[in-house]
Image (cartoon, rainbow, N blue to C red):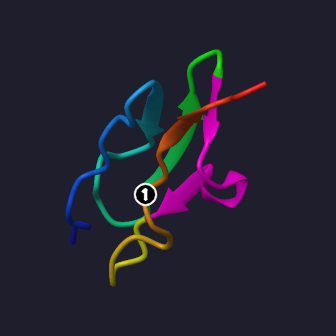
Amino acid sequence: MACKPESSHPNNGNVICSDGNNYQSVCDYTCDKGFKLSDPALDSRFCDGHGWSKKEPFCKEILN
């Protein structure tokens, strides 16, 4: 069983998944220097058999 769509690298960031988009895979998101996640609560999500546990985050520029 797999979750669709597969997790993708956010622009200006990275995603590492424990087992791709397969059941019980956990995906952790990070952003490049100078960027931050759109919502810190979206730093990780997992495939629970019904879909992804959270929406996919994006990275936004940190404005001073």
Q: Nearer the viewer, residue 24 or 14?
A: 14
Badge 1, how many Cα within 10 Å: few under 14, some, many 20+? some
Q: Farthest residue in the right direction?
A: 64
30 relative position to 24: left or right: right
Q: Is residue 33 magenta?
A: no
Quadrant in which residue 37 is drawn? top right
**Residue sitting at 64 percent across and 15 percent down?**
33
40 relative position to 32: left or right: right
Q: Give the quarter of the figure containing the N terminus.
A: bottom left
**Residue sitting at 60 percent across and 57 percent down?**
42
Residue 17 on image: x %, y %: 42, 42
At mark 1, the secondary structure is loop
Q: Nearer the viewer, residue 43 or 51?
A: 43
Quadrant in which residue 39 is drawn? bottom right
60 relative position to 6: left or right: right
Residue 46 on image: x %, y %: 48, 63
Relative vertical location of residue 22 with respect to residue 1 in this rendering, above or below: above
Quadrant in which residue 49 is drawn? bottom left
Q: How many numbered badges does the structure rendering display?
A: 1
Q: Nearer the viewer, residue 23 or 32?
A: 32
**Residue sitting at 35 percent across and 46 percent down?**
19
**Residue sitting at 50 percent across and 70 percent down?**
54
Q: Give the quarter of the figure containing the C terminus.
A: top right
Q: Which residues are magenta?
A: 35-46
Q: Amino acid at mark 1?
A: Glu
Q: Which residue is mark 1?
A: 56
Relative vertical location of residue 29 with respect to residue 64 in this rendering, above or below: below
Relative vertical location of residue 36 with respect to residue 52 in this rendering, above or below: above
Residue 36 on image: x %, y %: 65, 35
Residue 6 on image: x %, y %: 23, 53
Q: Farthest residue in the bottom direction?
A: 50
